[in-house]
Image: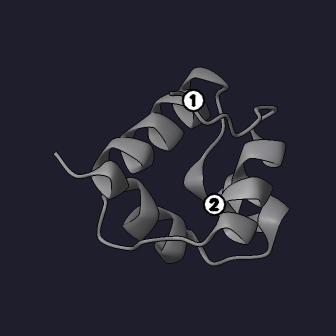
Amino acid sequence: MTDRERIGRRIKEIRIKKGMSQFKLAELIGLRQQHIARIESGLYSTGIDILSKIADALGCKIDLIE
């Protein structure tokens, strides 16, 4: 599994745990639902700015672990 796929799966896991749809997440950060779907499936590599917006919308923070 690539980092892109792992991060996408984690975003999906947190989003579902919070009871949020892809459409609602997309709406909160100004993207289309299809874009969220591609990120979650690991088909799209997102930049730090979008990743930060996703984290904020999900009530999370981005941490780097050694």
Residue farthest along the top direction in this orientation: 17
The 10 Å Cα crowd at callout 2, few under 14, some 14 to 19, many 20 or more, is some
Picture layout, residue 7 above or below residue 47: above
Q: In this view, does 24 lie to the left or right of 34?
A: right
- Taking the spot 80% from the left edge, 65% from the top edge, the residue there is 29
Residue 43 lies left or right of residue 56; in this view the side is left
Residue ID at (76%, 32%)? 60
Q: Identify which residue, 37 or 2, lies in the foreground.
A: 2
> Within 10 Å of the Cα at label 1, are there few (<14), some (14-19), or many (20+) other Cα atoms?
some
Any mark on residue 23, and which?
2
- Residue type (three-letter) at the residue carrying disc 2: Phe
> Which quadrant of the figure has residue 31?
bottom right
Closer mark to the observer between disc 1 and disc 2: 1
Disc 1 from disc 2: Cα separation? 15 Å
Where does the image place residue 36, in percent across and percent down from the top left? 52, 64
Residue 5 percent location from the top left of the image? 29, 51
Residue at 50% in and 27% down: 66
* Looking at the image, residue 46 lies above or below residue 3: below
Amino acid found under the numbered disc labelled 1: Ile
Query: Please, what secondary structure does the residue beneath circle 1 have?
Result: helix
Residue under label 1: 14
Q: In the rendering, at what x and y percent does residue 50 appear?
A: 70, 68
**Image height of 58 relative to 44, above or below:** above
Residue drawn 71% across the image and 53% down it: 54
x and y percent of residue 16 in the render? 53, 30
Q: In which quarter of the image is the N terminus?
A: top left
